[in-house]
Image (spheres, helix red, strand yellow):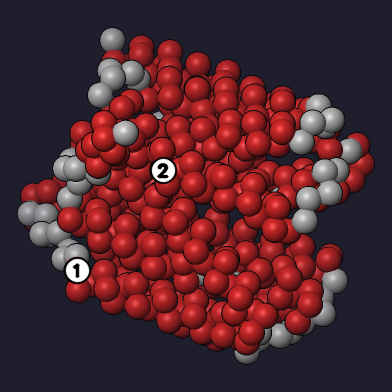
Amino acid sequence: MKKLYNNYIESFKGLSKEIWYLSLISLVNRAGTMVIPFLSLYLKNDLGYTEDDIGWILACFGIGSVIGSWLGGKLTDIFGFYKVMVLSLFITGLCFIVLQYISSFWGLCLGILITMSIADSFRPAIFVAIKAYSKPKNRTRSIGLLRLAINAGMGVGPTLAGIIIVAKGYSLLFWIDGVTCITAIILFSFLVKEPLKKSIEEREEHNNLDKNSVYKDFSFWIHSAICFLFGMGFFQLISALPLYYNEVFELNEFKIGMLMLVNILVIVIFEMPLINFLEKRAIPVTKFILMSCLLLCLSYVVLYQNFWIGILLISMILLTLSEMLGFPYTNKFALSRAKEGLEGSYMAMYAMSFSLAHIFSPKISLSIIYNYGYQANWLVSAGYGLLGIILSYWLFNKVKKEKS
């Protein structure tokens, strides 16, 4: 037991104080982002919108995320990640506060589109910040710590949100979301200082770079396709899977929440030690990406049978293991591939892959379920993983040839 404890503590050693501070503000921000999981319920129950209207409003959420990811990457390359992070989170806080006063359909579409365009410009910037504040050997563990903080915040936030909605209604959630965004970035500006500006020679060298090189990097396109497919499968976790648990196995919201909690607990307890263990092995990043796609595929293959409730737990553990490899190592590949001075553009393309999946995954899966049933959807979802395996193998061979 003592050895396990020591191994767990060791997995956190050697990370810079800036990475710890980044993780702290991510925890505060994600725990405070309470209204997002309940947005569809707010639109239906408080504002009285139909499912079709809600679908269009949430589509604006996804489109805003894509725009924000692209915009954040461009601005990061021009102004640096620090300024983009500070302005993005501060203005996002103000946007959340204003959103509660908008109730018209077109006003909500525009308001949510603008809010997400600003909010998700933060994502490429924080990825670049990880590269700036961590040593190459610690980069994957730095990503793991940030994910641990985000997942811990996701565990706390919705729980508190449910209590607040029952006691005070939705309005207070918008205030909390806004204030926590602003508080988090004020904390960040006090605790973390902007890196020293590059020399004139370095800036001139970066200005002479081909700004479109990310779009000419064929290996990175393959990687982006893998990320998109991975996202298409993984985001079933927030769309089709909860409905499946309820309609087929008749689990109520509490039991579904407990099953979802397995995902968060496994990540919080095991992800950092797992990454620490794997980082000591000389295994190519692309092999971990391939393994994550294999686990994703298996997590839906096992769901094809629906006569034993225990299969839900097995599927959730496989999906969680896939997530624990998929997100840190796709992120690591993107950071290592990013050319100096163009990190924002690379990380924007990385973030956009998942944003696009966030738009298409729920719509496609729910349409398949409506027309053909859940089992057909699990086969399609397993197919995303299978295609990811094929592309990962292709990427592994291509990167190997580039290095030889």
Residue at the (12%, 48%) spot, across then down: 202
Q: Secondary structure at mark 1?
A: helix
The image shows residue 347 at horizontal and vertical percentages of 39, 46
Vertical side of 170 occupied by 17: above or below:
above
Vertical side of 228 occupied by 27: above or below:
below
Q: Which of 159 and 368 lies nearest the eye of the viewer?
A: 159
Residue found at the very far bottom of the displayed protein: 101
Residue 345 can be seen in this image: no
Screen quadrant of the C terminus: top left
Q: What residue sits right under mark 2 in the picture?
A: 269
Q: In the rendering, which numbered label is found on residue 191?
A: 1
Query: In the image, 172: left or right of 147?
Result: right
Kindly identify the amino acid type of the residue bearing the numbered disc 1: Leu
Kindly identify the amino acid type of the residue bearing the numbered disc 2: Ile
Vertical side of 76 occupied by 354: above or below:
above
The image shows residue 294 at horizontal and vertical percentages of 57, 22
Q: Are marks 1 and 2 in contact (CB under 8 Å)?
A: no
Which is in the foreground here, disc 1 or disc 2?
2
Residue at the (8%, 49%) spot, across then down: 201
Q: Which of 335 and 183 lies nearest the eye of the viewer?
A: 183
Query: In the image, 192: left or right of 316?
Result: left
The image shows residue 124 at horizontal and vertical percentages of 39, 53
Determine which quarter of the picture holds residue 234: top right
The image shows residue 244 at horizontal and vertical percentages of 79, 45
Q: Secondary structure at mark 2?
A: helix
Determine which quarter of the picture holds residue 278: top left
Query: In the image, 273: left or right of 94?
Result: left
Query: In the image, 118: left or right of 375?
Result: left
Residue at the (50%, 22%) spot, across then down: 290
Question: Dot 2, how many residues are within 10 Å of its Cα: few (below 14), some (14-19), or many (20+)?
Answer: few
